[in-house]
Amino acid sequence: MKNTLLALFLSITLFSCTGGSLEKTLTSKAFTDKDDFNEFPKYKDKILVVEDVYDKNPDSSGGFAVKLKDTALYIQDGSKPLAKKYQDARFINSQKTAVLVQIEDGAKKISPFYIITLQNGLPNAVALTLPSNGAKDKDFAKGLEEITRTTVVVNNDFVVATVRGKVYPIKRQNPAEMIQGKFILYSSDKSTLVFAVDKGLYQVNYLTGETLTLPVPPKVLNSETMVREIQQNYSWEKNSRGTSFLKENPDDDRIVDIKEFKH
């Protein structure tokens, strides 16, 4: 009898049962460049499932749940409230062993992002959020911005390849704050990102970590046709390492191929 009660107590400790549903809380850890988000499942049922909460319960406020089999996966990040529901959730690998989520905490686009991933078949949570004291963080935190259908920018701090499960940190202009600018363009090879910042264009290649800040006149940065003017008056040039950066055209007679620009 004592063994039975002990087993029951341990089950309740590991999984809380509410209305027949199982729950597991994941304690998040910080992202490192050694993290692997592309695990191949050893068994067919060792994959994650994303559920639309509204589809399951039309009376709810919506959002998404992430599950492993029948167990709902929650995220605990330090002393922050337990995250049980996500405003966005999408797979970042074809094996369905990693899901990029943005928690539902009322902060909308500035809400933290995490990756729920399987490692050796067990669920883990990795935080894709860096500390920032930027004065205009709320203005420039845009949540997810698509570079392509399979590549997204996460709040100016990370690039996520949503097929191969690769995550690349974006080198900040100021280490203490997220890039205080609007993502506007990327190079034809999609690896150099361009942000319109206070006094020019901050360019960063997320594969090599190289950066270049190009001064641009305020009248261009404040223009409603800023992107078009940049396309007309600036061109991509490769440096000695083969990395593309925007440079101002040497003269007004150069014919620019708009196909060089992507966004």
Image (cartoon, rainbow, N blue to C red):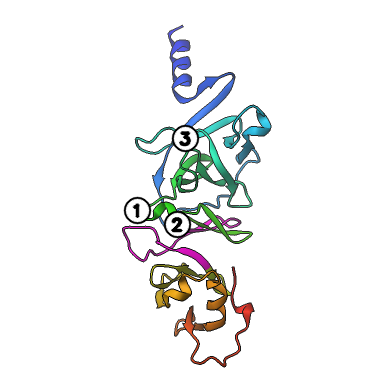
- Determine which quarter of the picture holds residue 175: bottom left
The residue that mark 1 highlights is 132
Q: Magenta stretch mostly in which secondary structure?
A: loop
Residue 189 position (above or below residue 157): below
Residue at 40% over, 61% down: 180
The residue type indicated by label 1 comes to Ser
- Residues rendered magenta in the picture: 156-184
Label 1 close to label 3 by CB (< 8 Å): no
Q: Position of residue 117 (x, y in %)?
A: 52, 45
Between label 3 and label 2, give the one nearer the viewer: 2
Label 2 close to label 1 by CB (< 8 Å): no
> If you read the primary sequence from the N terminus, does the residue marked by circle 1 or circle 3 appear first?
3
Label 3 close to label 2 by CB (< 8 Å): no
> If you read the primary sequence from the N terminus, does the residue marked by circle 2 or circle 1 appear first?
1
The residue that mark 2 highlights is 140
**Crowding at label 1, few (<14), some or many (≥20) Cα neighbours within 10 Å?**
few
The residue type indicated by label 2 comes to Phe
